Amino acid sequence: MRGEQINSQNIIARSATSVPSPQERDGGIDTVTKLIDVSRCIGCKACQVACSEWNDLRDEVGECVGEYDNPADLSPNTWQVMRFNEYENEQGNLEWLIRKDNCMHCAEPGCREACPAPGAIVQYANGIVDFNSELCIGCGYCVAGCPFDVPRISKKDGKSYKCTLCSDRVFNGLEPACVKSCPTGSIMFGTKKDMLDLAETRTDFLKSRGFDSAGIYDPSGVGGTHVIYVLQHADKPEIYNDLPRDPRISPMVDAWKGVTKPLMSAAIGLAALTGFFHYVTAGPKELSEEDIEAVRADEAREAERKAEREASERNREERS
Amino acid sequence: MAGLAPTFGRGAMTNHWVDIRNADLIIGMGGNPAEAHPVGFRWVMEAKEHNDARLVVVDPRFTRTAAVADFFAEIRTGTDIAFLGGLISYLIENDHIHHEYVRAYTDASLIVREEFGFEDGLFTGYDAENGEYEMGSWQYEYDEEGHALRDDTLQHPRCVFQLMREHFSRYSLDVVSSVCGTPRDKIQRVWDMAAETARPEKTMTFLYALGWTQHSIGSQIIRTAAIVQLLLGNMGMRGGGVNALRGHSNIQGLTDLGLLSDQLPGYLTLADNDEQEYEQFILDRARPPLVPDEVSYWRHYERFHVSLMKAWFGDAATAENDWCYHWLPKMGEDLYDILHTFERMSHGEINGYFCQGFNALAAFPHKAKVTASLSRLKYLVVIDPLSTETAEFWRNQGEYHDVNPEEIGTEVFRLPTTSFAEEDGSIVNSSRWLQWFWQAAPPPGEARPDAAILAGLFLRLQRLYREEGGAFPDPILNLHWPYRRPDDPSPHELAREYNGWALEDVVDPERNITVRAGEQLEDFGMLRADGSTACGCWVFAGCWTEQGNQMARRDNSDPYGTGQTLGWAWAWPANRRILYNRASARPDGTPWAEHKAVVWWDGQRWVGNDVPDFPEDSTPGANQGPFVMNQTGRGQLFARDRMNEGPFPEHYEPFETPIANNPMHPNSPLAKNNPAARVFEQDRENFGSFEEFPHAATSYRLTEHFHYWTMHNRLNAIAQPEKFVEIGETLAQELGIVKGDRVRVSSKRGHIDAVAVVTKRIRPLQVAGQTVHQVGIPLHWGFMGETKKAHLTNTLTPSVGDANTQTPEYKSFLVRVDKL
């Protein structure tokens, strides 16, 4: 980790392009990671407010949907939300699990893979996955490509938005705004190695307090993430408001890459050629049985979310 | 605070925020620190992480604090005395007390008068007609010199220890479980954890807030916890204490500066009507030791009082005119509290009301009464940075505030003030730290500092008295007003005045000059009763010395690793961080435990990692007690004179209780509720019954908002936009309510509508053989600001207060819930 200006040489991967990214600089750039220790979170939402303050975001004043969660979901101008879950454990004791939900900054980001707009999604050498909104065409593929359901498309400008891990702060040697605001030390920031060490210490502590299944959430299906969790019940990530057990990039993304993306690219002009090259060199992938299952699971999850959203909207309408 | 001072001597948090990290056990009860004090709560997490501490939460709801606790026990609101009274009995009967500490540092050994007794839930001396006690029998037995008799073996049947033991013996596990609704095994678990801290090397801290104070028995709940901590030897120790987490950032400063109707700055008190003689007034307050040779620091009362009068009246205050004693108002009532004021206002006995920094309509109980009372005023002056509900009380707000402006003749003036970020000054936090802060932004529009507004008002009044005369003009014409800009006294000038200065050279007994005329005082030890010193608030002496503004210090070095940081800001009294820290050492002056050491005797004087809260050169052999403000020098297990409902705490039901009688005294109607509470007739008529309003309700605040302020801020509004109430799953099912439904919550005094949050975090309780459901009602949201418009929560709450402080019973009342 080091403080420096964002410049193009920090970019190690860009969406929808086969022009290789700069590779030469490798002198001591550690990847960064935000560690969210759910067991220390009191759900105060200081991080949520700090995020809006730093990034100049002001969502609508919403309504209470019968939970502490507010705003109830991510939006183009709410880049993180706290998700509150009441969980009765095996001993019959109640736990209130409060998870800060935001972009996980995957090492192998589905959004970047899916994105057809050249350079609209970039990955920096420090691990941050950033949206270069100027180049975003608002197609929504990043939404489908994300296994964590994070990006949101703005109705105002048709562009996609999500947490930047405060890339502007980080490049200037500061921690993300959410980390700075956390009063209990539930959110920590440092190199991935340091954060994994810290997470391990925390996991040991939790185990000493009777949380036998405490563990680290750093899913390998997306190459690991630059936002990791310490969970009291790492064997049951789904109790933390449907944190995916084994997130993977939807095989549909690869399918798009093979077929749809060149067409998309053609539609937007200059990039067509690179897409074609990609098609020629990578070729269409065949879907394995596992992949098909994953697609189905993915579709089922999406359907479920959609149903929930609709139900909640219906509920709202009825009330108003 | 009224529970702490009669026990330990001072009404303030005994330890401090950072010290919480030194605790081995933290009990969050009567407060929800993660929710209401999220920043200070970091020290709780530190204790868990680095001191292997356990966090226990006892609360009607599974709160945000409970979310990170090691153990949670549910309790019925308003029954904490039973829970803790049972703990006292458990500790005594199972020998989990710190014997040497109890014997040396508490009044356990003192012998109480034979007349004292307790029967049918009432102590001796009860006057049922007036609902108050004559406290004559609540006294020690004294010898001819006025010193209390004692039995250091603690065997005398009337020594405090034996009386206390008998008093709390009724609080068995079964009884406590039945009163509180807490399952027996959970109570036992909490008691066992607390009992472990009787060992000298272990400490427990209580963190409480308005969940204890806002009951008709609030002060006595705090007393009960204080007794527990004395028995366990957890006072004066690192990681110990009874720690009041203050609800406003500067509410500690409010009490320090005496902004209560019966107080003067520095916990000095106003005289009653029948105290017309100055000498007697001082004599009654300059309390002599009740145990030979004790410090009894209040015996210097006159030094503080005279210095205050010199600060207020300057040269006009002389020995000949009793230092202007006769210019001070005398109290015609016990207290002119808000309930008393609005009672009088409702009868048309008050014409004008200045409402400064207070949103009365939203914050006071029984909103309908507050509205009716404000409507009877001729004028209302609201001094506030925001457009409050109070300032808009006359305007019709539809269903949320349905009044007819044509029927309200009150003229409302709004005087906009600066907010804390728009001025310099100091804020006193819960830890008694005076922390100087600096203006961050210029005030908008016509906003002026509160001091400037009051100065302008004062100068105009003074001019009118000077030009036109009037009844008793002396105190107004002679008020000392030495400020550079009389219409805008600066925070710096005021702070220097609170610290105090010498008016003449002050000399010590050896005739050495300790401070020269005109110089700032170093500490309150320099104050004199002869008019040679002026001091606006004696406990603040030392905050702005000749060395400058001590409150602005920002040295966070911590050489002992204890968290005391003596160079950070300045704490009253005398920069002491842990009160009563003499008790961290054995009577012989050595620490009870090395890793808990605060101060110790080095052969010549008291030294340590904190400023000793004790005479620096008092040898261990002198046997002076650590509670230097108390006449006994000891922690008071027995509150002799300052608790209106009795020297020992006793459980009484809230004035609105979900059960038919007080399970402790089912056959004694007088002992159902606090027998010493003051209830106005119209308020009594507005109490509801559990037949009509079956559910126990409690009100509280959320992290996302600060009272009624932050509803005006978009980001806070986004984080929690709309009024909700919390209902347990069982009750919701019974009523056919699902999450997100709109519900109506009614009490005898009115109703509010809100969204239902249906939760597992509130469980039905088994209380005295019946099922009690509790309903949680956040206090935020109103009809002003950025959030969705809503009814004010205090539409529901009853107008009755604690018998000592008159703090309203916001935490326990009865409601009914209906689905809309």
Image (cartoon, grey):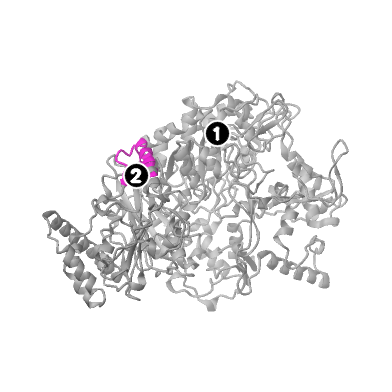
Q: What type is the residue that disc 1 sits on?
A: Asn
Q: What type is the residue that disc 2 sits on?
A: Gln
B684 or B513, nearer to the observer: B513
Q: x, y percentage for residue B390?
A: 55, 68
Q: Quadrant of residue B154?
A: top right
| Residue B404 shown in magenta | no
Task: Determine the secondary structure under disc 2.
Answer: strand
Q: Quadrant of residue A58?
A: bottom left
Q: x, y percentage for residue B26?
A: 48, 39
Residue sitting at x 72%, y 34%:
B615
Dot 1 or dot 2, earlier in sequence: 1
Q: Is residue B253 visible?
A: yes
Task: Determine the secondary structure under disc 1.
Answer: loop
The range drawn in magenta is: A198-216
Side of B200 relative to B306 (left or right): left
Side of B159 relative to A256 (left or right): right
The residue that disc 2 covers is: B770
Side of B538 relative to A304 (left or right): right
| Residue A199 shown in magenta | yes
The residue that disc 1 covers is: B234
Whether residue B743 is situated above or below residue A92 in the rendered picture: below
Q: x, y percentage for residue B142?
A: 70, 28
Q: Is residue B82 visible?
A: no
Nearest to the eye among marks 1 and 2: give it.
1
Task: Determine the chain carrying the residue at label 1.
Answer: B
Whether residue A234 is situated above or below residue B91 in the rendered picture: below
